[in-house]
C-alpha cells in the first residue's frame, strides 16, 4: 500500500494536522470512486444509493423531500434532482401529501428495493473486505476520532 506522500507525489507537509486533513480528503475521494465504480453496473450513483437506503429504512412509509435532504450523507446533494432521476428509472415514486399539497413525499418501489438489495451486497462484499485492513478496535478508534473532529 502506498503512502499518502507517494499517492499524491508530495514529499512534505507543514505538520501532521495538515497531512491528516489532506489524507481525509484523499481517502474520501478514493472511497467515493470505489463505491461509484461498484454501483456503475446498477446505473445509480453513490448519492442515489444513499437516497434509496434512506427510503428503505422508512419501511414502506413515504418520506418528505425535506427529510430526505436532512438525512443525506452528502448535504450538498440535490435531493429533488436525485429523486427525479430515480423516478425516471422507476426506482421511486413521488406523491403529494394529503395534509399539505405543497409537500412532496417519496417512496421506494419494488424495483428500487431489488436494485438496492443487489447493490448493497456488492458494496458490502467489496468495501467491507477493504475495511478488514484495520481491526475492529482500530475501526472504533477511527470512528471516535472522526466524530470528535466534526464536533
Image (spheres, rainbow, N blue to C red):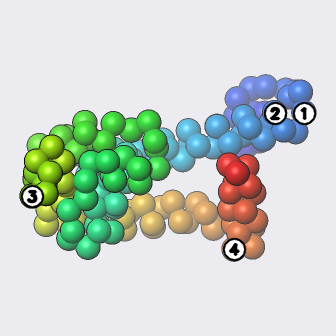
What kind of element bears circle 3?
A: loop
- Mark 3 → mark 1, Cα distance in angstroms: 56 Å
Query: From what the image shows, is residue 141 above or below residue 6?
Result: below
Residue 100 coordinates in the image, percent (x, y): 14, 51
- Mark 3 → mark 4, Cα distance in angstroms: 46 Å
Q: What residue is at 18 percent from the left and 54 percent from the top?
A: 105
Kindly check if marks 1 and 2 are in contact, taking CB atoms under 8 A apart as contact.
yes
Q: What residue is at 41 percent from the left and 50 percent from the top?
A: 70
Mark 4 or mark 2, earlier in chain: 2
Kindly check if marks 3 and 2 are in contact, taking CB atoms under 8 A apart as contact.
no
Quadrant of the rendered structure where residue 132 is? bottom right
Kindly check if marks 1 and 4 are in contact, taking CB atoms under 8 A apart as contact.
no
- Tell me if residue 135 can be seen: no
Mark 3 or mark 4, earlier in chain: 3
**Left or right, 58 with reference to 151:** left
Residue 122 coordinates in the image, percent (x, y): 38, 62
Mark 4 Cα within 10 Å, few/some/many (few <14, many 20+)? few
Quadrant of the rendered structure where residue 3 is? top right
Residue placed most toward the observer, 49 or 93: 93
The count of marks equals 4
- Tell me if residue 84 can be seen: yes
Q: Which residue is mark 3?
A: 98
What kind of element bears circle 1?
A: loop
Q: Which mark is residue 18?
A: 2
**Left or right, 115 with reference to 135:** left
Amino acid at each position: 500500500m502506498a503512502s499518502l506522500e507517494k499517492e499524491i507525489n508530495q514529499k512534505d507537509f507543514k505538520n501532521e494536522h495538515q497531512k491528516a486533513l489532506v489524507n481525509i480528503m484523499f481517502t474520501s475521494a478514493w472511497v467515493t470512486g470505489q463505491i461509484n465504480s461498484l454501483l456503475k453496473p446498477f446505473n445509480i450513483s453513490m448519492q442515489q444509493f444513499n437516497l434509496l437506503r434512506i427510503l428503505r429504512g422508512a419501511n414502506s412509509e413515504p418520506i418528505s423531500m425535506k427529510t430526505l435532504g436532512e438525512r443525506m450523507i452528502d448535504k450538498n446533494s440535490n435531493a429533488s434532482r436525485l429523486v427525479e432521476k430515480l423516478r425516471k428509472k422507476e426506482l421511486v415514486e413521488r406523491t403529494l401529501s394529503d395534509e399539505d399539497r405543497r409537500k412532496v413525499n417519496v417512496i421506494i418501489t419494488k424495483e428500487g428495493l431489488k436494485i438496492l438489495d443487489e447493490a448493497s451486497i456488492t458494496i458490502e462484499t467489496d468495501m467491507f473486505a477493504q475495511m478488514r485492513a484495520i481491526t475492529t478496535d482500530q475501526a472504533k478508534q477511527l470512528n471516535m476520532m472522526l466524530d470528535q473532529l466534526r464536533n
